[in-house]
Image (cartoon, coloured by chain):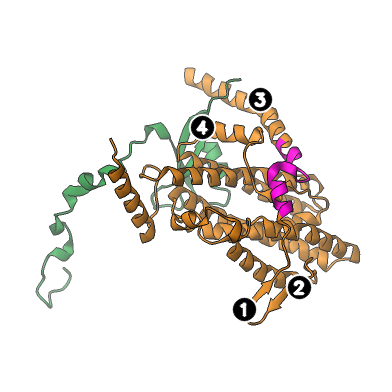
Chain colours: A orange, B green
Amino acid sequence: MQTEKDNKQAEFDFQAKIDKGDKIEPKDWMPERYRNQLVRMMSQHAHSEIVGMLPEGNWITRAPSLRRKAILLAKVQDEAGHGMYLYSAAETLGVDRTEMLKQLHTGKAKYSSIFNYPTLTWADIGAIGWLVDGAAIMNQTALAKGSYGPYSRAMVRICKEESFHNRQGYEIMCSLSFGTSEQKQMAQDAFNRWWWPAIMMLGPSDDNSPNSDELMRWKVKMESSDSIRRRFIDRTVPQAEFIGLTVPDPHMKFNKETGHYEHGPINWEEFFNVIKGNGPCNKERVKARNEADKNGRWVREAAEAYAEKHKKN
Amino acid sequence: MKETQWPLWEIFIQANPGIPHKHVGSLHAPDAEMALQNARDVYTRRKEGISIWAVESKNIVASAPEDVGSFFDPANDKVYRHPTFYKVPEGVKYL
């Protein structure tokens, strides 16, 4: 039986390993809280990839050219792939995929707040790739250095693929911004609607993240949300200015002394409200996932029947 | 329909000719053929490989992390297995 002393020693060794920069692998000893935190993070991350297919999938049939359609299809397919990497990484910690999906379908699971906003025009597809994938890359590049081996490896793979997502989004925004005045207006409108949600999706401000210290010590979280947010803003504002878009924040200004942009107050009430399930599209998203699950059932049944038949022969 | 989980498969990909297959992750599939097809879609969307191995996870036997010490112990005291153990007179070449 493991005594409390053994446990203390195991925890000490575990921390030493992380401090040394070694990865924790699925069969290694780990504190229960570490395991639970990772299961929570990885499953939420996986759900976000899967639900993230919906707002963009909405525009596949209406993409303005064959080129744009092929690109958008490939991007949405990547998101499905990312969901698969992450579910399989989460499973290495002993959680069942059926259980994770059940939580998503019953509305119990959380996923990124950003995907509960609607995609009203084609410019939204540009704004998502540029801003949402841009913010996600900042977050995921940090996570790729995390301590849990399977998660970190999945992140490395995802980051490699995301950079095309980011660029294709900015390309759409460029085309629209340098297009007719209606097109430019459309780009500005999408920017106005996606800017704040993208700022918020990086997570609550540091003084509102109670578990941060432990997660940082365990290298589950690698960088504070505010710090990632600052980098995102510093990189994105000049990109907006370059194509003549105005950041929808009257307080946004560059501080020459710090070398950073300073933003106005963030409406956290809206963020927590969306997280709680009251965003514009929360119900629609969960409903769409349930329908996809139901409508795909015959495919799974056929695959099983086929496998069964071949087993007998 | 029974909502049981399909078997788990570990996927190994050979990126280029002449190098070993490398583990990339896992996936669920009802049989070997579909495991291969799913692996192609999930893990090689950008020409990441020229060959895929799919092995049902339950068939993989792994050493236990807690046994690392004793399991690999036999190699610890055999420094004479490495070329650097041997002294070679200065000036001798090709050794």
Q: Is residue B48 above or below residue A205?
A: above
At label 4, the amino acid type is Glu
Residue furthest to the bottom: A257
Classify residue A82 as left or right of residue A281. Answer: left
- Residue B75 visible in the picture: yes
For label 4, count other residues whose C-alpha is less than 10 Å away and answer few (under 14), some (14-19) or many (20+).
Answer: few
Residues A91 and A306: in front is A91
Q: Position of residue A298 (x, y in %)?
A: 66, 25
| Label 2 residue SS | helix
Where residue B33 is drawn, which disc sits there?
Answer: 4
Is the N terminus of chain B in the top left, top right, bottom left or bottom right quadrant?
top right
Q: Position of residue A184 (x, y in %)?
A: 85, 65
| Label 3 residue SS | helix
Task: Report the Cα–Cα distance between label 1 and label 2.
Answer: 20 Å
Q: Residue at x 75, y 69 (%)?
A: A240
For mark 1, name the chain.
Answer: A
Same chain check for tags 4 and 3: no
